[in-house]
């Protein structure tokens, strides 16, 4: 498909959105606002990510279409409000991409912040990207570089982004070994906090110790995020893969219990472990 055909396809989507929002359009679509559309945008984005993770090409196409629809709908709502137009949104992102890729576009305004000697690696591209943001774009207005991380991010994603920015600023371990040492240290602190809470009989003091347990557990999760970062693994993707793995294996355990006319609650730990190990073994065999 060429650029003209792609442009015509987007123009068609734009005209459909205008019709939906017109006085004689859809009652539901007419009632929506940028704020009411937030959850839809997030939901569709996660569904697209899920389809990509599953390598389900048919649904990747479908879900990306839904993401386009929601983004374009929100942009058009702002056009109706007089804030900016859909054209402004598309032009702004196009100009930004050109500006932040001076190594690709010779006339890019980002040339003044281009790395000396050019870029040859993805890491250098990201460094140059940040230089342009803080240079020609004058985005260095926050008190902390961590202020650049959106407050609305889910905690795991926020931790990953915050630690990436801190590492770029020079606040990091030399290698992943240092993070593993820190993880072991935090695990010991968590064990001690759990012991203190378990030994306490006074309910008020117990609540204080429970807060301490929560803090220590948070530190451990932070360490794991940093291990993922050092290994160049997005912890959000890794966690989602683990969720899917657990779903498959637990569903197998449920099915095996049902075959024996049992509820999971009625199974012994030995039975459950046997089912679980069978689920793992079946997965390994299906991968070969």
Image (cartoon, grey):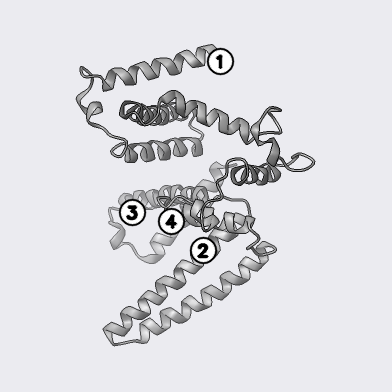
Disc 2 is placed on an element classified as: helix
Disc 3: which residue: 257
Labels 2 and 1: the sequence-earlier one: 1
How far is disc 3 from disc 1 in space, using C-alphas? 56 Å
How far is disc 2 from disc 4 in space, using C-alphas? 10 Å
Foreground pick, 246 / 252: 246
Q: Mark on residue 222? A: 2
Disc 1: which residue: 3
Asked whether the residues under the numbered discs 3 and 4 touch, taking CB atoms below 8 Å apart as contact, a structural biologist would say: no
Labels 3 and 4: the sequence-earlier one: 4
Disc 3 is placed on an element classified as: helix
Q: At 65% from the left edge and 46% from the top edge, which residue is drawn?
A: 131
Q: At 51% from the left edge and 34% from the top edge, which residue is drawn?
A: 55
Report the mark closest to the observer, 4 or 1: 1
How far is disc 2 from disc 1 in space, using C-alphas? 44 Å
How far is disc 4 from disc 1 in space, using C-alphas? 39 Å
Q: At 62% from the left edge and 33% from the top edge, which residue is drawn?
A: 99
Disc 1 is placed on an element classified as: helix
Position of 65 with respect to 4 (left or right) is left
Labels 3 and 1: the sequence-earlier one: 1
Labels 2 and 4: the sequence-earlier one: 4
Indicate the position of residue 223 as horizontal and vertical percent values: 55, 64
Quadrant housing the C terminus: top right
Labels 3 and 2: the sequence-earlier one: 2
Position of 127 with respect to 31 (left or right) is right
Asked whether the residues under the numbered discs 3 and 2 touch, taking CB atoms below 8 Å apart as contact, a structural biologist would say: no
Quadrant housing the N terminus: top right
Disc 4: which residue: 155
**Residue 280 visible, this angle:** no
Labels 4 and 1: the sequence-earlier one: 1
């Amino acid at each position: 498909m060429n650029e003209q055909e792609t442009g015509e396809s987007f123009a068609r989507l734009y005209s459909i959105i205008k019709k939906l929002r017109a006085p004689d359009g859809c009652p539901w679509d007419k009632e929506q606002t940028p704020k009411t559309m937030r959850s839809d945008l997030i939901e569709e984005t996660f569904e697209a990510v899920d389809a990509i993770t599953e390598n389900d090409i048919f649904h990747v196409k479908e879900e990306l279409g839904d993401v386009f629809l929601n983004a374009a709908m929100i942009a058009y709502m702002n056009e109706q409000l007089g804030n900016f137009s859909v054209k402004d949104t598309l032009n702004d992102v196009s100009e930004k991409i050109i500006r932040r890729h001076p190594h690709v576009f010779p006339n890019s305004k980002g040339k003044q912040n281009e790395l000396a000697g050019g870029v040859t690696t993805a890491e250098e591209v990201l460094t140059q990207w940040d230089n342009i943001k803080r240079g020609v774009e004058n985005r260095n207005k926050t008190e902390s570089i961590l202020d650049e991380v959106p407050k609305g991010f889910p905690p795991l994603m926020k931790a990953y982004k915050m630690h990436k920015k801190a590492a770029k600023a020079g606040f990091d371990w030399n290698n992943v070994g240092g993070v593993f040492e820190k993880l072991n240290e935090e695990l010991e602190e968590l064990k001690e906090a759990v012991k203190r809470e378990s030994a306490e009989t006074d309910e008020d003091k117990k609540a204080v110790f429970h807060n301490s347990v929560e803090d220590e557990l948070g530190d451990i999760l932070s360490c794991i995020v940093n291990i993922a970062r050092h290994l160049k693994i997005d912890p959000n993707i890794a966690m989602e893969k683990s969720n899917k793995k657990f779903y498959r294996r637990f569903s197998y355990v449920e099915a095996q219990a049902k075959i024996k006319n049992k509820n999971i609650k009625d199974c012994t730990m030995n039975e459950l472990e046997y089912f679980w190990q069978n689920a793992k073994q079946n997965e390994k065999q299906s991968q070969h």
